Amino acid sequence: MSKKNQTFRNLPDMNIIKSLLETFGLENLEDSRLFTREHMIEINTVDKINDMKSKLSEYYLPCKCKNYLEDINEKKCITILRQFVKIHNYKVSTFEKSIKGNKQMIYQLTPINDDFLSPTKSKKDDNRKYVVSFDI
């Protein structure tokens, strides 16, 4: 893990990723359950990440610690999660949903290489299957 990175001095290993995912109520990188900021408040994600601050600081560059590990709120928690899972080719996908008239941001872990619904490059024999789901 000697590859240079603009965010991390030590690339995050799976142990810290698993600990971080648990603060969001997720089991592993393949856990595709949806979560919201409201869910994060219910399970005390901010407090749990504050408790992990010293462990997380071992990974971040010192200048990044000041940006991301001070005054932690739900938005910074999502940013921290995005940065850590990106190293392992995952991303935090975001979409907006209206629930009982209130707009909420919904988050979900997805592999970076997922190309669902991406345009094809004029392949005549493209037999890819797509799954479109609508949460009601």
Image (cartoon, rainbow, N blue to C red):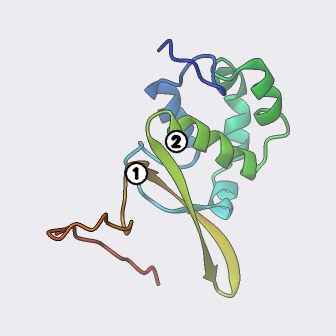
Residue placed furthest toward the top: 2
Residue 97 has which mark?
Answer: none
**Splitting the image into 4 quarters, where does residue 120 fall?**
bottom left
At 41% from the left and 56% from the top, the residue drawn is: 32
Residue lying farthest bottom? 101
What residue sits 27% from the left and 68% below the top?
122
Q: Please state which amino acid type lies under the numbered disc 1.
A: Asp
Q: Residue at x 43, y 48 (%)?
A: 112
- Residue 82 on image: x %, y %: 59, 44
- Residue 20, given in percent of the width and then of the height, sits at 56, 37
Q: Nearer the viewer, residue 86 or 34?
A: 86
SS at mark 1?
Answer: loop
Residue 30 shown left or right of residue 66 in the figure? left
Q: Would you say the residues marked 2 and 1 are in contact, meaning their CB atoms lie under 8 Å apart?
A: yes
| Distance in Å between CA atoms under marks 2 and 1 | 9 Å
- Tag 2: residue type? Leu
Looking at the rendered structure, the secondary structure element under dot 2 is helix
Residue 67 falls in which quadrant of the image?
A: top right
Is residue 83 found left or right of 77 in the rendered image?
A: left
Please name the residue that numbered disc 1 is placed on: 31
Residue identifier under label 2 = 21
Residue 125, image x, y percentages: 14, 69
Residue 70 in the image: above or below residue 108: above
